[in-house]
Amino acid sequence: MINLYKEKNECCGCSACASICPTQAITMEPDEDGFFFPVVNNSKCIRCRMCLKTCHFRDTKIKGNRPLAAFAAINKDETVLKNSSSGGAFSALASIVLEMGGVVFGCAFNERMEPNHIGIDNFFDIEKLQGSKYVQSKINNTFIEAKRLLDQGRIVLYSGTPCQIAGLKSYLGREYNNLLTVDLICHGVPSESFFKDYISWLEKKNKWKIITYKFRDKGKVNMGYSGKVIYIKKNGKIGERTIYWPLDCYYYYFLNGDICRMSCYECKYASNYRQGDFTLGDYWGVKKIHPEVNTQNGVSLLLINTETAMGYVDKLSNYLKLVNSDFEQAKKYNGQLNHPVPKSEKREMIFKTWHTGGYTAVANEFYFKNRKMIVVNQVKIVMLQIIKKIIKILKMFGT
């Protein structure tokens, strides 16, 4: 019998083992917390041990590249910038690869609000891959599809969390000159089941049908993070609502590292040594490092980790305003470039509450225990909204 892991923290759920299996004996199945783990069908297994050989997470050594260069990056296209989580650097990379006739892989929500990795080959679909998704995506057959395209000579850009990129490389088993990889600065991942239960709770509570959920929304009151829900009302009209992180239980628990996969708390990839050719994320601390940069609409931290990536900097400058930066400074303000998210003392209780009472119980407990904090932040939001309106009026009159 093949044992791919002993403890839950020994598997990151990247699907490399399932992808490499020659008899399709391995499927990714959710555990009680909704996180996907490999399950071996022993009647199909031929004991070739390819799954064990491909598992990068079993290797305790940190492999990767320290960044060769760092940039503060802002997309020159205002529309693209508005639709991006930060500075729109991913959209620029995707556009370059599509112009070269390539295929871009990344995470997208389907109509059931499920996060899946997909491949796109046209510019119209870039928007599907834009924006942060604070939930673990299913890889499905995208490693297999990426390899098929690479073997055909197509250029492939594959984006994902560092463990997903490490999984892809381990599955491929060799270098490809036509492969570009992007790893994201990852805070840790909640499970799909927990997220979907949260969405169902929002719908029942508000009598909505949610059609779009954005974890990051620009143009609203700046509380560090805010998202947006677009929904259909009972009367058929379309509405939208801002999700402020201090007032939303899912958002709050995610940012505090309370609902992550167990492997995230010991992730060896949350370090200076990067898995992708490029690393992308929010540029926290940019105002202190680059006070001259306009941060109003978002700024990406773009790390160039390989010589391959360095060869694309000139092309990227056609799409992005690039400001030379310093990695040693940038990593001071981006914790997951140094260490994994600390394990939360609340995690066990949150999942226990979810198992026994569903997401309604999780939400009720959150709002009861944090009622003082919530009231304080509600007042802050109202005050910031008033200040924003006053500034807008003053600008209208040229004051």
Image (cartoon, rainbow, N blue to C red):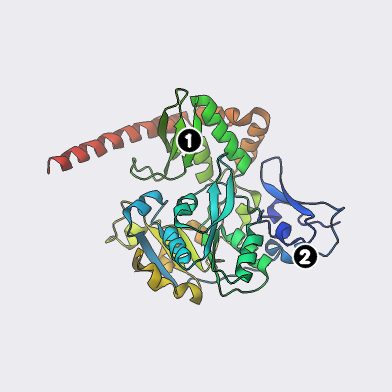
Q: Quadrant of the C terminus?
A: top left
Residue at 41%, 31% in the rendered image: 239
Q: CA distance from mark 2 to mark 1?
A: 43 Å
| Kind of residue at badge 1 | Asp
Q: Toward which corner of the image does residue 53 lie, by quadrant?
A: bottom right
Q: Which label lies toward us, 2 or 1?
A: 2
Q: Name the image quarter holding the N terminus.
A: bottom right
Residue situated in front as seen by the camera: 115 or 287: 115
Is residue 312 toward the left or the right of residue 40 in the image? left
Instruction: Measuring from the top left, give residue 365's x and y in whole percent.
Output: 56, 29
* Residue 74: image location, x then y, percent: 35, 60
Q: Position of residue 2 (x, y in %)?
A: 83, 57
Res 248 label = 1
Label 1 SS: loop
Residue 199 seen in the figure: yes
Mark linked to residue 10: none
Image coords of residue 214 (percent x, y): 46, 43
In primary-sequence order, the first of circles 2 and 1 is 2
- Check disc 2: other Cα within 10 Å, few if <14, some if 14-19, many if 20+: some
Task: Tell me the amino acid under the disc marked 2.
Answer: Met
Q: Residue at x 32, y 32 (%)?
A: 382
Q: The residue tagged with tag 2: helix, strand or loop?
A: helix
- In the rendered structure, are the residues bearing label 2 and label 1 in contact, judged by CB atoms less than 8 Å apart? no
**Which residue in the protein does label 2 denote?**
50
Q: In the visual, does 124 lie left or right of 51? A: left
Height in image: 187 above or below 337? above
Occupied quadrant, residue 65: bottom right
Residue 298 vertical placement versus 323 (above, below): above
- Observer-nearest of 218 and 353: 218
Neighbor class of circle 1 (other Cα within 10 Å; few <14, some 14-19, many 20+) is: some
Q: Is residue 68 visible?
A: no
